[in-house]
Amino acid sequence: MRCPKCGGLDDKVIESRALADGRTIRRRRQCNTCEYRFTSYERIEEKQIMVVKKTRSRREPFDRAKIEKGIQQAVRKRPVSQNEILTMIDELEEQAVHEGMDSHEITSARLGELVLDRLYAVDRVAYIRFASVYRNYESVNEFIHEIERLDGSAAGPLSKDSGEGT
């Protein structure tokens, strides 16, 4: 595997972990030339999971980078490590693959709720930040209402529509 830092081809595997019910292997590697550490993924090549957008007329391939960008924005300047973020993304992808196994599809709404569930467990401020964008709050009152529900709820994140845990 070519090192992303120096381009060297000599590396060693430090750690391997199975993901997505054994369909993916995450490998932590270290370049023997410059000692840079990086991650590679080994996956079974099969039909890619598609994300069904809100309009239901559009579908796009599941994109780890897009999920990571949203999470990075939510956790910006929060005490959340890059390792926690990568683990969260791995778990999200694993769950999306599992839930979309039969149809190879998952709705963007469901994917957003999965992200909110993970953020709720990791950092409540990041949860509120992501929820404010994902749920498209249009007023300060909606924001305040979400924070009040968050303060009063020990059971977990709340769905926008029902007021009950997801």
Image (cartoon, grey):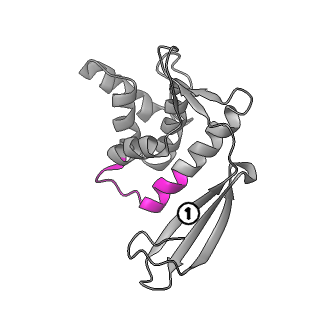
Q: Locate residue 143: give its quadrant.
A: top left
Give whichever of 133, 2 is nearer the camera: 2
Amino acid identity at mark 1 = Ser
Identity of the residue drawn at 72% across and 51% down: 23
In the image, residue 115 sits, relative to residue 87, either above or below, namely above
The count of marks equals 1
Determine whether the residue tagged by mark 1 lies in a helix, strand or loop: strand
In the image, residue 145 sits, relative to residue 62, either above or below, namely above
Identity of the residue drawn at 39% across and 24% down: 135
Check the picture and name the quadrant holding the N terminus: bottom right
Residue 41 position, x and y percent, is 59, 59
Q: Locate residue 87: give its quadrant.
A: bottom right
Residue 148 position, x and y percent, is 38, 28
Check the picture and name the quadrant holding the C terminus: top right
* Left or right, residue 80 beside residue 1: left
Identity of the residue drawn at 68% across and 33% down: 99
Classify 10 Å Cα crowding around label 1: few (below 14), some (14-19), many (20 and above).
few
Q: What residue is shown with label 1?
A: 40
Identity of the residue drawn at 60% across and 28% down: 106
Give whichever of 99, 124 is nearer the camera: 99
Whether residue 124 is visible to the viewer of this picture, yes or no, is: no
Residue range (magenta): 75-88
Q: Residue furthest bottom?
A: 33
Check if residue 14 falls in the magenta segment. Answer: no
Residue 92 position, x and y percent, is 57, 43
Whether residue 53 is visible to the viewer of this picture, yes or no, is: yes
In the image, residue 129 sits, relative to residue 159, either above or below, namely below
Give whichever of 13, 47 is nearer the camera: 47
* Left or right, residue 87 beside residue 99: left
